[in-house]
């Protein structure tokens, strides 16, 4: 079993930055891809960013490209999401997710493990 614990959400103004962190513990094995989803009220959950096991491959939703950066520290089993130039439309619950093995970004959309979520609210 794997546990994911997020931190770093909050209330900010448009244009501000936030950094989300997610620490994984448990049986992550030799390969464990990680990423971030978000879900706003009344909207479907969407994959925001994904990073491969090695960190060599990343994916971003079009809506966040150029503003968000995903990174990981494998020694700490931690993934980060640096969010810059935040917009009100970025307001959502953000969920860290993980999937064992070496999935592609498309395959990662069916993640195996989920964090509890952290709220990000961007005021205009």
Image: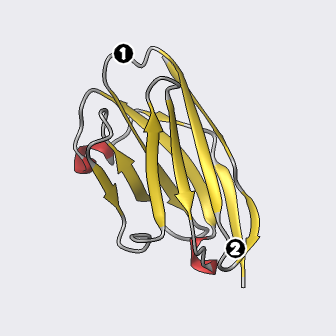
Secondary structure under tag 2 reads strand
Q: Are marks 1 and 2 in contact (CB under 8 Å)?
A: no
Residue at 37% from the left image edge and 49% from the top image edge? 50
Figure quadrant of the C terminus: bottom right
Residue drawn at x 67%, y 50% as measured from the top left = 118
Q: Tell me the residue at 52%/52% (across/down).
A: 81
For the question of whether residue 44 can be seen, the reply is no
The image shows residue 95 at horizontal and vertical percentages of 55, 48
Q: How many marks?
A: 2
Residue 115 picture quarter: top right
Q: Position of residue 80 (x, y in %)?
A: 53, 45
Q: Earlier in the sequence, mark 1 or mark 2?
A: 1
Kindly identify which numbered label has been placed on residue 29.
Answer: 1
Dot label at residue 121 = none
Task: Give me the residue at 69% from left, 57% from top.
Answer: 119
Label ID, residue 122:
2
33 to the left or right of 69: left
Say how the picture is coloured.
secondary structure
Residue 41: x and y in percent read 61, 68
Instruction: Give the answer, above or below, for where 8 lies relative to 115.
Output: below
Mark 1 and mark 2: Cα distance apart in space: 36 Å
């Amino acid at each position: 079993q794997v546990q994911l614990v997020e931190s770093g959400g909050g209330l900010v103004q448009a244009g501000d930055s936030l950094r989300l962190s997610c620490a994984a513990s448990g049986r992550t094995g030799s390969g464990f891809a990680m990423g971030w989803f978000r879900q706003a009220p009344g909207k479907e959950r969407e994959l925001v960013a994904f990073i491969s096991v090695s960190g060599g491959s990343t994916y971003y939703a079009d809506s966040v490209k150029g503003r968000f950066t995903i990174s990981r520290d494998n020694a700490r089993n931690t993934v980060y999401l640096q969010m810059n130039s935040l917009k009100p439309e970025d307001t959502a619950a953000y969920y860290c997710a993980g999937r064992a093995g070496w999935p592609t970004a498309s395959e990662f959309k069916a993640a195996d493990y989920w964090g509890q979520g952290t709220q990000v609210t961007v005021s205009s």
